[in-house]
Amino acid sequence: MSSTQRTAAAATVLAGLLACSPSTGASAPATAGLAAESSGEPHAEHAGAAGIGDADFPLDGNGGYDVAHYGLRLDYDPRGKRLTGVTAVAAKATQPLTRFNLDLHGFEVGAVSVDGRQAAFSRSGDELTVTPGRPLAKGAKFVVKVAYSGRPEAIKDAANLGTYGWITTSDGAFVTCEPNGAKTWFPANDHPSDKARFDFEITVPAGLTALANGELVGKPRTSRGKTTFVWRERHPMATYLATATLGEFELREGRTPGGIDNLAAVDPAFRSSLGRVYSLSGQITDYWAGIFGPYPFSSTGGVVDDFATGYALENQTKPMYGGFDPDESIIAHELAHQWFGNSLSVRRWRDLWLNEGFATYAEWLWAEHRGRGKAQETFDTQLARAATDPIWAYPPGRAKPDDLFNESVYTRGAMTLHALREKIGDTDFFRLLKDWNTEHRYGHVTTAQFIAMAEKVSGKRLGSLFDAWLFTPRRPPADNR
Ligand code: TRP
Ligand code: ZN
């Protein structure tokens, strides 16, 4: 929270003053937040910060409010590659706000309103600054609506994060947004520390299918050559996990053996994978519910599109596989993320091993369950890597913004968990995995919280083990294995 917070009384006075100031047409300065504070511009001290406070990703997310709900109404034309959208963001001000930012990449913004009244706005880079006609008091609930259109532009970061966001395919779009690509298709507080519920209303040419998170609400409606799909994710979700993947799909719907709604969807090019993706996703979801605790969401499944990203993303309730037939290991990984990453989310990207280390360890557990080698053997093989291997130089407990998805975050993160398991024993280790989920279900987590819970569950001091595995740029010494 900013040091320039004012009392509610001061905000009320300010509201009176601002009531007669020009509120529309006049745009806020190009940069809001911190930069504006020194500009001498009136009321700049009530600007929401341009970033949510993740020092490694300073412009991701925004300050001054907390989103409760996104309502996305989208119409996509795959031929013209044009997206027309109206996004309604319901939020609560966490400080007095004369203006605030949303993250949005590209598009033409047509109109912005706050609580139904037209609001001024300006754009600078991926920051959309909104100046409501009336300032918002701390604690005020408000709805900001943004109408926008244009050709979505995926983010291409060849050196580090690859291509992500709204990715155009031959028949539609493949939408996978980690870490900050939600802004390529809707105005967002685009950082996992602000989760919200989502409603989607997605209109596509008749014959295509739009797949979003959660469950379908009613039957898709077709009129005048277009079909509208309504989806609802009723559990909190980080923006990077939202999807609106659309195109030609073949579907299989039903329930997992344990009774969870299950939906598999594959591009016709992957028709032969449909049955496998459906049944493996169901079996694995049920298996993880036994190991990690109850499944956190209302449905599960998997989507294979024909766009060859070569990666997968754990989109909430619907992992996406980009252009390949997923094997058991990657399905196990993406479904483990429904607990580790999706239900329990990072507050800061540097703690990413809490997602990737756990999901990778889940792959090892699944292999063992299927009789394809013990986790201990996988660990031993990894530990045999040369002392000069880069995995030992990269401490996974502090994921680097310029190399966020380094293999160490995955593999050495998983090794950390195995080292912990060896130290505290199976009973405490698996109790810890369940307690961790129960305690932080739908919330946020940090590495320090995990270490504290591991110590509590085991009654052991574990500081040196975690230091060696997570925070030291060397292969851990023998006494910490
Ligand atoms: N979280 C993904 C996984 O481990 C990998 C990933 C990182 C990703 N960045 C991405 C996937 C961007 C899609 C888009 O399964
Ligand atoms: Zn992962």
Image: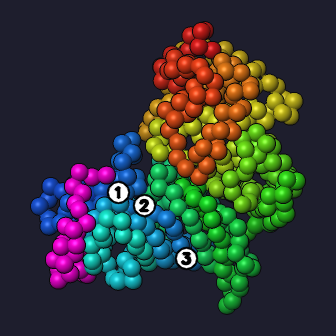
Residue 63, numbered label: 1
Residue 346 is covered by the magenta coloring? no
Q: Is residue 301 left or right of residue 191?
A: right
Residue 311 in percent (x, y) is at: 64, 46
Question: What distance separates the C-alpha of mark 3 from that of mark 2?
Answer: 21 Å
SS category of the residue bearing label 1: loop
Asked if disc 2 is less than 8 Å from ligand 1, the answer is: no
Label 3 CB less than 8 angstroms from ligand 1:
no
Tag 2: Cα neighbours inside 10 Å, few (<14), some, or many (≥20)? many
Q: Furthest-left residue in view?
A: 40
Q: Main secondary structure of the magenta part?
A: loop
Left or right: 386 as drawn, with respect to 152: right
* Residue drawn at the location 87% of the way across and 30% of the way down: 371
Q: Residue furthest bottom?
A: 224
Q: Which residues are magenta?
A: 1-28
Residue 368 in sight here? yes
Q: Is the C-beta separation of discs 1 and 2 under 8 Å?
A: no
Q: Crowdedness of circle 3 by 10 Å Cα count: few (<14), some, many (20+)?
A: some
Whole-percent x and y of residue 244? 61, 66
- Mark 3 and mark 1: Cα distance apart in space: 25 Å
Q: Quadrant of residue 297?
A: bottom right
The residue to which callout 3 is attached is 73
Of marks 3 and 2, which one's residue comes earlier in the chain?
2
Amino acid under disc 3: Arg
SS under mark 2: strand
Cα separation between marks 1 and 2: 8 Å
Query: In this orientation, which residue lies closer to the viewer: 284 or 244?
Result: 284
Residue wearing tag 2:
66
Residue at (52% x, 47% y) in the render? 444
Residue 320 spot, x, y in % from top left: 68, 54
